[in-house]
Amino acid sequence: MNPFINIEEQIDANLKLRGYTELTSIQKAIIEKEITGRDAIVSAQTGSGKTIAFGLSIVSNIPNNNKVKKPPSVLIIAPTRELALQVQNELDWLYSKTSICIVSCVGGMDMRTEKRNLKKFPDIILGTPGRLKDYLEREVINLSKVKVVVLDEADEMLNLGFREELEYILSQTPKERRTLLFSATFSKQIEKLASKFQNNALRISTVEKNKQHIDIEYHAIKVTSNNIEYAIMNTLRYYEGKKSLVFCGTRANVNHLTSRLNNRGFLVVSISGELSQKERLNALRSIKNGHSKVCVATDVAARGIDLPNLDLVIHADLPKTKESLVHRSGRTGRAGNKGISILMVPQDKNKQLQRLLNNSGIIAEWRNPPNRDDIIKQDDFNIMQDLKNLDKPSEEENILVEKILKKYNQKELATALIRKFRENKYTPDDLEPIKNSNKEKTKLLKFQKSVWFKLKLGSRQKIEKHYLLHKITEVGKINKKDIGIIKIENENSFIEINFRILDKFLSSLENNNKSYPELDLILLKNKPNISIQKKSTYLSNKFKKTKK
């Protein structure tokens, strides 16, 4: 059975060629028959495939006869150049080998080339607000026959001050057009825009309010203010080999941190508003093709950036809003891949961040930054993994291998391998330890007696700590501060709970066991016989003193 509904055969083939076996939830929702032809306000999780969603939806508004010269049928508006170009890349492969023609009108690009392309009578015009308004005023484009308008990341366009441009552009399109509005949130500004330019719009959301993105693991790292840069460097060194995006609050901070990382040997590029379009594209190309591993950017500059296989997001400066936190972090953990979002938390901003996490419905694991020992151990693990996954040598390599084996012994070869692996890499810094205040020490003493629970699910069932922590707090109706060690083994998991809240926890479990049958926790009489290392503690090593 064909899994794709109301899609032309070639687009169906393009999706399958791209590896699609089924559509995402937002893609299924947007192309349902009952919303065909209707206005819609759409909210979806970052990385959920919304570009393909509206790409599928607007096909029905594009005439099949490409021999007739005609004005565009579709207008797509995006807040930034990067997002507009990313949308075009996605739609190019979706519409590959079809008659659909797309032309971009984007600020910072060559206007002469754009004007030549517009003479090809494209089906779709894709642009940024400023350039589109400019072309309309100069009568370069004609939107009188537009059948559908897509506003991508409408909330960000309003935040960037494009309300006037949007209202002017939409006033130049037919009143009976269809309007699809995509926004991360249903804010008052979005409601006002929708009421003015949409008619009986259908609301579509695949984002559960205050639900954590299950593919993103959040870490909050405590640091002293003068150690933040070193903590970032140690973190990048610990997760070496992974693609990382580091967020700073200002252009000046981007330039400073980029310079520091570059001086310490990291393969780094930066993206900020002061760069030319050519410089920005070169930076993106460098990190996409693997020449660079770290990209440092501001929030605005990173809008629309899609870095495939991005493993790690680091917040060098804390986000100011929950929308910023979710959007930044959403650059990773996309399309079913796992990702890590790390927040660098100065000691005086612990409470500020915790409020932000609570408001966002996000549970973060509080950690100390990786120290020298952690990084060396990770190096050792990476070396062993590289050797484990080594391909068989070629004939040419075999000749050299034999020569080396005759001249050097095993210890000399292993030493050379280790030194080569660590060559030209950043030497980890010893960071100043965080000192707990007397108030914090008093809090820690409260968790002196604990009980243990067993769950008959483990790593073989793909259970992960952050998922388990999230479920326990949600179902048990307890604070994460009352959860100590979480130890996941092959077939079982063990969870330490503060004895003080045991009755409340058991009562909540009993009330919710029908809704969450997978969370079948067994109360143990004694502490389980398990090996617990430092890294096994889920909330740092807060709860050192436990009693049976």
Image (cartoon, helix red, strand yellow):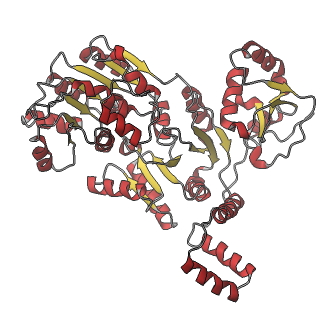
Residue 293 shows up from this direction: yes
Q: Residue 149 location, x and y as percent?
A: 24, 26
Asked whether 8 or 429 is in front, the reply is 8
Q: Is residue 275 above or below residue 54?
A: below
Q: Which image quarter holds the C terminus? A: top right
**Picture layout, residue 437 above or below residue 211:** below
Q: Quadrant of the N terminus?
A: top left
Q: Between 182 and 36, which is closer to the camera in this rendering? A: 36
Residue pictured at 41% horizontal, 22% vertical: 29
| Image coordinates for residue 190, horizontal then vertical, percent | 34, 21
**Displayed quadrant of residue 489:** top right
Q: Residue at x 48, y 67 (%)?
A: 263
Residue shown at the point (84%, 24%) measured from the top left: 500
Q: Residue at x 47, y 35 (%)?
A: 21
In the displayed structure, does residue 517 sit left or right of residue 526? left
Q: Quadrant of residue 480?
A: top right
Image height of 427 relative to 137, above or below: below
Expressed as whole percent of the image width and height from the top left, the position of residue 158 reads 31, 29
Choose between 294 and 306: the one closer to the eye. 306
In the image, 100 versus 394, the foreground residue is: 394
Q: How many marks?
A: 0
